[in-house]
Amino acid sequence: MNGYGGTILRVNLTTGTITRQPTPEAVARDFIGGRGFGIYFLTSEVPVHADPLGPENKLIISSGPLSGMLAPGGGKCDWTTKSPLTGGYASASMGGHFTAEMKYAGLDSIILEGKSEKPVYLFIDDKKVELRGASAYMGKGAIDVEVSMKKQFGEEFQIAAIGVGGENQVLYASINHDYGREAGRGGVGAVMGSKNLKAIALHGTGSVTVANKDAYVKAGKALYKACKDADNIAEWTRYGTTIVVSWCDEVGALPTRNFQAGSFEGGKTLYAPVMREQIVITDKGCFGCPCPCGKYSNVKKYKTEVEGPEYETIGMLGSGVGLTDISDVAQANLLCDDLGIDTISAGSCISWAMEAFEKGALTLEDTDGIEMRFGNAEAVFAAIKKIAHREGKLGQLLSEGVKRASAKIGKGTEKYAIHIKGMEQSAYATHNATAMLISYMTCDVGAHHNRAWAITYDLQVGRDKVVPEKVARVIWLQNFRPMFDVLGSCRLQWVELGIDRDLYVPLLEAITGVHRSWEDMEKTGERIWNLTRLYWSREIEGFGRDWDQPSPRFYTEPPATGTTAGQITKPEDVQKLLDMYYEQRGWDSTGHIPPETLERLNLKEFSVH
Amino acid sequence: MRLYADHSKCSGCNACRVACSLNLFGVSNPKMAALIIEPHFPAPGVYEVKVCTQCGDCAKVCPVDCIQQNDKGAYYVVQEDCIMCGACVPECPEGVMFMRAELVPNTAWECDLCGDCVEVCGTSALWIAEKA
């Protein structure tokens, strides 16, 4: 099959059985790859109400038709599973070189099933696939494991590993690859840990066939040229995602002390030029990327190296916890990556604990004696270590995520547990940004930004406006942007460099032999989006409108300081946004997909389980 | 003319190596490229790029004279004449004369200065210029 590795690799950790099946042509036709494959296999194969951390859950790793090819940013790898954090759908996108290597090993998806009795790692060298004992690696950091395995197997091997956070099944444990590229969100690392799988070492030497080589090279080069010709490529590449720190601070979107405000008085020392000057040493790219957002840093203060911090981490483990020194943020980033926990959820949990501590809802006894105050870098480092090890009262409490932690503590702390569907909100404050708010409320994994990064549209249209156009924009972005995760490539060339997305159409056709316009792909995107919604409905008793509600902070507590001081979304507007969203999606007022919409999207076969 | 690389600008993306393998063998396979990116991570955190300097040491030892110069002055392997003796590989001071029978069973290979790597490099880490 042109453009594909051609094989779905199944690894049953319980029995040790390894099987290969040809990638089903119908699945490639309807779901294309990447997160499309992920939700297809998750919905089709994981039993209803499976325990996310039990052997019945599966961890599905997928490449896409652009992965490993002459395509800008063809290095995106999808990790889909049932989330232990939310109980619903999880799909974490990881950059780096893993997904390209999958293609060279002939693999479109790796499906990890069951649970190993003993710790193991998965070794893949082209057709040679083995489960090997991992006792020697247990308790080690994810970065240490990568160093060891690269030394043992060679630089050509690509490694994905969990840290102790994954081993301890912290509900937002991550999977680290390429020294700082993470499959971060939703607890994919906890699922890997629950299967007793410490790492995957992967090497492939094959080539992927294409439908029309000459057209492929021509279209691939045209995309690279468009990227290189973009006016802002030099500035973007110099700073990567950190370029938005100052912008978010100025417009009141920078999470400040657990989203109590959207502008940070200490923010300027976290801005991109300061970071570049103080710690960045190398631009680090994912596979095939002409405009690498990865900034690799040497942190003299701690004598450490780390990829990042990127914007989200600066927001959540910088301004979010009140830190002003970029070196402290970088060190917190490194601890999270090596210990294997998501920087976004970790930052949210720590900032929640700091607010609770300062308000007296948590005491020194609850925090194991740590002064959990905003701006205390040592407290941040200590909390990260405790979370990853599930150590002490604080570590136990925060390792379960902010929804469970606040439910356990009570005392009004639920009101400032900033999450949706149980997933901690990423780094955009939404007191007065209604498009971004509805984007978070309806995101398919919980409060994550990257499906519909609509905050610039708020500024364009009028941030407090609640109009159908905003909702339509969010739905369009939700249908369209995740298609890059389906194709196995990065969206940032389109988002940040503004290259013409139609340039991808001839490339995809030359690779796969199938013509798909963006209109076609948006239809696939809409179908996938609805399928993820169906998954939530089938897994969670009583799922519906209540699960799409944002943190009350964004409609009851106007910030006291910063650009958005005194500004807030009206409670009735939150519901109005949801009404408009459901109507435009063709869902009913409870947030469920009615039969006629299922029929229109040809999803009826997936609705009965 | 020869290919030059600035390590400090390389981000390790490997687009150059995909383009290279497409030029040399018509496939997308960075392991069949004629330049090397050696990542040095986690410390010191730099990418080392190794490229052909067109020194010609490979051609001097080829027993069947299958390493010729093209119209750009670049040494290249006449694939049908290569006997896979491997004599050229250790002669290359940069380590960019390749022979990997498991990947390409019938020939050694090296940079022929096609320039496709330069074309796709987004960070201007590669360029072709006169030999110094």
Image (tube, coloured by chain):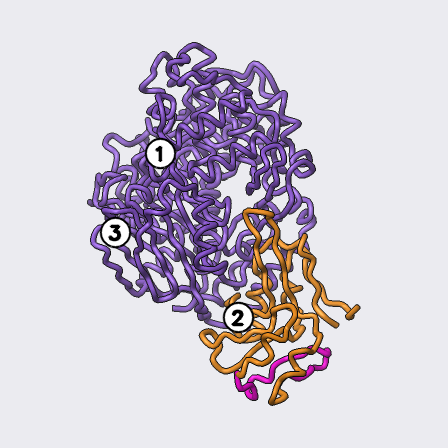
Chain colours: A purple, B orange
Is A95 in front, or is A303? Answer: A303
Q: Position of residue A322 (x, y in %)?
A: 55, 22
Q: Chain of mark 3?
A: A
Residue A215 appears in the picture as rendered: yes
**Amino acid type, mark 1:** Val
- Stretch of the chain drawn in magenta: B67-84
Q: Work out which quarter of the rendered image holds the C terminus of chain A and state it.
A: top left
Identify the secondary structure beneath mark 1.
Answer: loop
Image side of residue A240 versus residue A169, left or right: right
Compared with residue A482, is residue B88 higher up or lower down, i.e. above or below? below
Q: Work out which quarter of the rendered image holds the N terminus of chain A and state it.
A: bottom left
Q: CA distance from mark 1 to mark 3?
A: 20 Å
Identify the secondary structure beneath mark 2.
Answer: helix
Q: Residue at horizontal 56%, vertical 31%?
A: A329
**Amino acid type, mark 2:** Met
Q: CA distance from mark 1 to mark 2?
A: 41 Å
How packed is label 3: few (under 14 Cα within 10 Å), some, or many (20 or more)?
A: many
Q: Are marks 1 and 2 on the same chain?
A: no
Query: Residue B70 lies in magenta, yes or no?
Result: yes
Q: Position of residue A178 (x, y in %)?
A: 49, 49
- The residue that disc 1 covers is A170
- The residue that disc 2 covers is B32
**Amino acid type, mark 3:** Leu
Q: Position of residue A161 (x, y in %)?
A: 40, 47
